[in-house]
Amino acid sequence: FSKKLSGEYSTLYLSFLSWVAIAITNVPVSLWLGEPQLVPSFHLVWLWALVVLGPWIAVEGYGVPSIWILAAVGILSNGPHLASTWSRVYLDGNERWRRPFHYWVVPALIAAAVAGFVATQGRKSDVLFSIVFYWAFWHFLSQNWGLIRIYQRKQGDIAGFDARLERAVLYLGAFAPFAWRLAHGPTKMFGARVIHPAFPHWAPHVVGLLAAGAATLYLARLVVRAREGRAIAWIRPVFLVACAFGFFVPFVLIRKSGSAAFFAAAAWHGLQDV
């Protein structure tokens, strides 16, 4: 394994080795259980944000190579995440053909696009990994908003002002560290450069101030609600704090490796889904 870390093997090949480990550890469980949803309580999902501390400590404190972070995230988080996703779709005969375009055509198009980028630009295609970076950020953010919407619907607050304010808090709390990463770097993943517009160093501070303003207004409304003796669904503000934390650590605190920062965000995202 140390030989593979020496640079003689490509990132794509190392990723393949990680996927072999994922298949060995997760596919049998997925096939056996059919749909491995193993998290005991949905209301504990926000706790998984703490998982980003692992890569941060490993990379910044001990200089652990990013490929080790990739292997750990793949086996412990993204492997189960993907296994649980495809088992819900492709092992269910009723669901498998329910959305043929989404389940069959889109994956085929993505595979063809990746193959095209690799064939024309090489395995470290800046365009390919830029798409991965921006698409992943949107995907992570959308999943968190979807979870917030589930909480809102369960508590009968799907269209009120607080529900809309929660969206502003979530989005601004994610975009502030995202803007920081684009402005200050590092913006390299898997040896490729993430293509982005020139961000002035003050831009993340502006987004951060907007996020702080939205969060302050939200907190003030919670205080008013509590003083009036009305019930407060604490899981929603706690989850918003977890979301901000889950984006802040990878994009702001993990500075030595853009790849490891990406893997840290992916770890939290994967455990949320599982």
Image (cartoon, grey):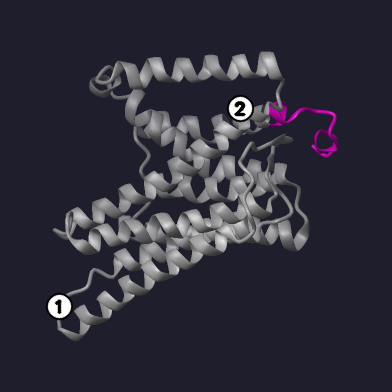
**Placement of the N terminus among the 4 image quadrants:** top right
- Residue 234, above or below 12: below
Q: Position of residue 105 (x, y in %)?
A: 39, 15
Nearer-N-terminus badge (2/1): 2
Segment tinted magenta in the rendering: 1-14
Q: Is residue 42 magenta?
A: no
Q: Can the viewer see residue 41 in this picture?
A: no
- Residue 200, above or below 86: below
In this view, the residue in front, 100 or 228, is 228
Picture disc at residue 165 = none
Mark 2–mark 1 Cα distance, whole angstroms, equals 50 Å
Picture disc at residue 230 = 1
Q: Position of residue 41 (x, y in %)?
A: 32, 57
Image quadrant in which you'd find residue 4: top right
**Placement of the C terminus among the 4 image quadrants:** top left
Lateral position of residue 74 relative to residue 217, left or right: right
Q: Position of residue 6 (x, y in %)?
A: 86, 37
- Residue 94, above or below 71: above
Q: Can the viewer see residue 215 in this picture?
A: yes
Task: Specify the amino acid type for callout 1.
Answer: Arg
Eye-nearest disc, 2 or 1 = 2
Disc 1, SS: loop
Is the C-beta separation of discs 2 and 1 under 8 Å? no
Image quadrant in which you'd find residue 180: bottom right
Q: Is residue 3 magenta?
A: yes
Residue identified by numbered label 2:
128
Q: Residue at x 48, y 68 (%)?
A: 209
Disc 2, SS: helix
